[in-house]
């Protein structure tokens, strides 16, 4: 407002706003059914609590990831890939690379739509199937060895080796015995497993910053991050 420009009897209203620190933690989780138990809300006993506002978007397959869903979020967590790898036509390392290339393409789309977002990529969880685990290990090594070193906007979420049993398979104590069709379940976490997955999301300061913690910090970017070993 220039000096002398205000007429007599004219009133101006000025509004000053501050952006809550919570906005820096606005997070979307995009993932398969194992992320379905990760909840956002106000109750810290049933969700991430008020300190972490956000939303979960289901994406059973990599093709289901929508870059537009990430717009407006500061942090994007991706946990998807196992359903792509278990397809019958994914048999060789070359086939696994095709799945990996689809993932990197989706990440590029996210970074185009939301260039300021920090992206956190989870490895595929181990399963109770040795052959599927071999494909998972191949896929995770591509993430660690190729994606992480070449894309500084992506952070690897370490700690998934803690889901393994002594045989290198998904621990039965952390997973369901039967699926909803009463058939053996080789993939899905039980409540205890979901609690462990949630604890991985609360072990450092990268998303919440000084106010709290959600996902593994900068050290998780290291290329030497742990990959579970298939039998």
Image (spheres, rainbow, N blue to C red):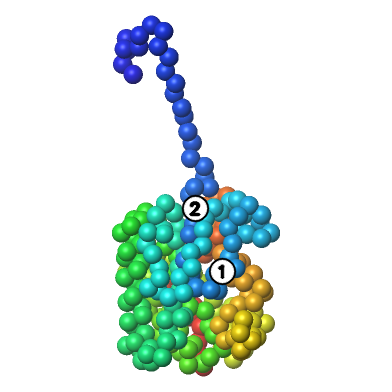
Q: Which residue is mark 1?
A: 36
**Camera-side residue of 70 and 23:** 70
Mark 1 and mark 2 lie on one chain; the one further toward the N terminus is: 2
Q: Are marks 1 and 2 in contact (CB under 8 Å)?
A: no
Label 1: few (<14), some (14–19) or many (≥20) C-alpha neighbours in 10 Å: some
Q: Residue at x 48, y 59 (%)?
A: 28
Q: Position of residue 5 (x, y in %)?
A: 31, 12
Q: Compared with residue 91, is residue 120 higher up or lower down, i.e. above or below?
A: above
The answer to whether residue 75 is seen in the rendering is yes
54 lies left or right of 148: right
Q: Is residue 169 above or below residue 8?
A: below
Q: Which residue is mark 2?
A: 26
The N terminus - image quarter: top left
Mark 1 lies on a secondary structure that is loop
Residue 95, quarter of picture: bottom left
**Which residue is nearer to you in this view: 151 or 192?**
192
In this rendering, does residue 207 appear at all?
Answer: no
191 relative position to 161: left or right: right
Q: Is residue 102 above or below residue 218?
A: below
Measure how far apart labels 1 and 2 are at the Cα level.
Answer: 18 Å
Residue depicted at 38% across the width and 88% down the height = 90
Is residue 109 rendered to the left or right of residue 31?
left
Q: Give percent across and percent down for residue 206.
A: 50, 58
* Residue at 63 percent of width and 52 percent of height: 42
In the structure shown, which secondary structural element does the residue marked by tag 2 occupy?
loop
């Amino acid at each position: 407002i220039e000096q002398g420009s205000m007429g007599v009897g004219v009133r101006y209203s000025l509004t000053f706003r501050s952006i809550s620190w919570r906005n820096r933690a606005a997070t979307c989780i995009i993932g398969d059914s194992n992320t379905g138990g990760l909840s956002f809300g106000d109750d810290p006993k049933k969700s991430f609590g008020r300190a972490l506002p956000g939303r979960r978007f289901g994406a059973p397959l990599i093709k289901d990831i929508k870059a537009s869903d990430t717009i407006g979020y500061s942090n994007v967590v991706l946990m998807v890939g196992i359903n792509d790898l278990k397809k019958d036509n994914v048999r060789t390392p070359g086939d696994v690379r095709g799945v990996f290339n689809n993932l990197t393409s989706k990440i590029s789309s996210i970074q185009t739509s939301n260039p300021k977002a920090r992206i956190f990529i989870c490895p595929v969880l181990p399963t109770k199937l040795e052959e599927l685990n071999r494909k998972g290990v191949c896929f995770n090594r591509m993430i660690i060895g190729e994606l992480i070193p070449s894309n500084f906007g992506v952070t690897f979420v370490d700690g998934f080796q803690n889901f393994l049993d002594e045989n290198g398979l998904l621990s039965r104590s952390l997973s369901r015995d039967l699926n909803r069709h009463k058939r053996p379940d080789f993939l899905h976490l039980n409540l205890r497993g979901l609690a462990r997955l949630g604890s991985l999301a609360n072990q450092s300061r990268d998303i919440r910053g000084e106010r709290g913690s959600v996902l593994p910090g900068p050290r998780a970017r290291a290329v030497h991050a742990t990959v579970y070993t298939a039998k």
